[in-house]
């Protein structure tokens, strides 16, 4: 059996083992997760690697679905959120913001587009507010600039 054939045979076992990793561990080895593709039946909490932008995404709670070409993880934040390491959300350890993430009032976020820190000042539901924009887009509505 060739190296390639052996790797293909092992892939399902690797993906099954990867499912048990924490998000922080998963970010160390994102390519161990199944690649996002059209036609997959995905369940809330499942993680998929989106090759075009080299990002690991998690299917949002309550958003199980069948993947479709126009609903890629990078442009459908209602269905997917990027996996990120845990941050405390303090001014010294802000959470890295991403389109489609759930923001929590009184936590601090680092906007990767301008490297500024923002404080979330509003929350629409008890579990937070899912926004398709970065903090710099919503200053005065959901955020205030801190640095």
Image (cartoon, rainbow, N blue to C red):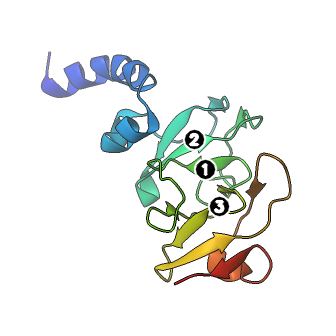
Mark 3 or 2, closer to the camera: 2
Compared to 22, does 5 lie above or below? above
How packed mark 1 is, by other alpha carbons closer than 10 Å (few <14, some 14-19, many 20 or more), is: many
Compared to 142, does 29 lie above or below? above
How packed mark 3 is, by other alpha carbons closer than 10 Å (few <14, some 14-19, many 20 or more), is: few
How packed mark 2 is, by other alpha carbons closer than 10 Å (few <14, some 14-19, many 20 or more), is: many
Q: Is any atom of residue 51 visible in this view?
A: yes
- Residue 75 or residue 91, whichever sits in front: 91
Callout 3: SS: loop
Mark 3 or mark 1: name the one nearer the start of the chain. 3
- Horizontally, is 10 left or right of 45 in the view? left
The N terminus - image quarter: top left
- Horizontally, is 5 left or right of 68 in the view? left
Mark 3 or mark 2: name the one nearer the start of the chain. 2
The residue pinned by badge 2 equals: 58
Disc 3 to disc 1, how far (Cα)?
A: 10 Å
- Residue 100 or residue 125, whichever sits in front: 125
The residue pinned by badge 3 equals: 75
The residue pinned by badge 1 equals: 81
Disc 3 to disc 2, how far (Cα)?
A: 13 Å
């Amino acid at each position: 059996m060739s190296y390639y054939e052996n790797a293909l045979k092992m892939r399902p076992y690797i993906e099954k083992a990867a499912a048990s990793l924490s998000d922080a561990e998963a970010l160390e080895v994102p390519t161990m997760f199944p690649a996002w593709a059209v036609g997959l039946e995905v369940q809330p909490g499942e993680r998929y690697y989106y090759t075009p932008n080299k990002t690991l995404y998690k299917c949002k709670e309550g958003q199980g679905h069948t993947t479709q070409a126009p609903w890629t993880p990078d442009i459908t934040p209602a269905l997917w959120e990027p996996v990120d390491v845990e941050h405390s959300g303090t001014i010294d350890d802000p959470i890295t913001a991403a389109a489609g993430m759930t923001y929590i009032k009184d936590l601090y976020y680092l906007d990767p587009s301008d490297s500024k820190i923002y404080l979330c000042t509003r929350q629409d539901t008890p579990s937070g507010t899912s926004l398709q924009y970065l903090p710099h887009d919503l200053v005065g509505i959901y955020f205030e600039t801190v640095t």
